[in-house]
Image (cartoon, helix red, strand yellow):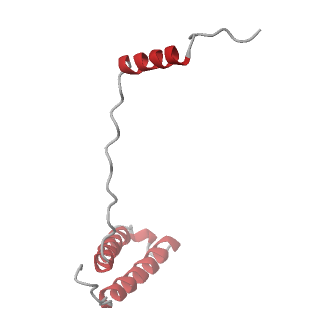
Amino acid sequence: MGRKRVHETAAARQKAYRARVRIAPRPNPAPLQKKRRQPSRPKQLAELDEKISALLASYEDWRDQMPDSLESSAQVEKLTDTVEKLSAMAEILADIDPPLGFGRD
């Protein structure tokens, strides 16, 4: 008592498989994606400097738009501390002069 055979022979099974494959629509293969090369180190530093400058400007705007009634609040003190630290980071990044590497920079 075994399973009922669908195809009599292996050749018939292969023929049925090929017919199914021929009829079935083939999915389009996914396009190959090239690996993006990481930007050079000087470019990464420049991007980091731009991001810190933008962040610094947004924190300064936030601090400047605080109402006078909150002048001595803890939030304004934290904002001032954050602005000072971001300013120091921006100065440190501006002072960095990395070496160029093998003509790719």
Residue 19 against residue 58 in the figure, above or below: above
Residue 7 against residue 30 in the figure, above or below: above
Screen quadrant of the N terminus: top right
Residue 55 against residue 97 in the figure, above or below: above
Q: Is residue 41 left or right of residue 11?
A: left
Q: Nearer the viewer, residue 5 or 61?
A: 5
Q: Residue at the far right: name it.
A: 1
**Spot occupied by residue 20 in the image (x, y as percentages of width and height):** 42, 17
Q: Is residue 34 left or right of residue 12?
A: left
Picture quadrant where residue 63 is located:
bottom left
Q: Nearer the viewer, residue 58 or 98?
A: 98
**Spot occupied by residue 59 in the image (x, y as percentages of width and height):** 37, 71
Residue 5 shows in this picture: yes
**Spot occupied by residue 58 in the image (x, y as percentages of width and height):** 33, 68
**Spot occupied by residue 6 in the image (x, y as percentages of width and height):** 58, 10
Which residue is rendered at x = 27% and y = 86% of the image?
Answer: 100
Q: Nearer the viewer, residue 51 or 87?
A: 51
Which residue is rendered at x = 63% and y = 10% of the image?
Answer: 5
Q: Is residue 62 left or right of residue 81?
A: left
Q: How many marks?
A: 0
Residue 72 shows in this picture: no
Screen quadrant of the C terminus: bottom left
Picture quadrant where residue 34 is located:
bottom left
Q: Nearer the viewer, residue 73 or 80?
A: 80
Residue 89 against residue 30 in the figure, above or below: below
Which residue is rendered at x = 41% and y = 83% of the image?
Answer: 84
Which residue is rendered at x = 29% and y = 90% of the image?
Answer: 97
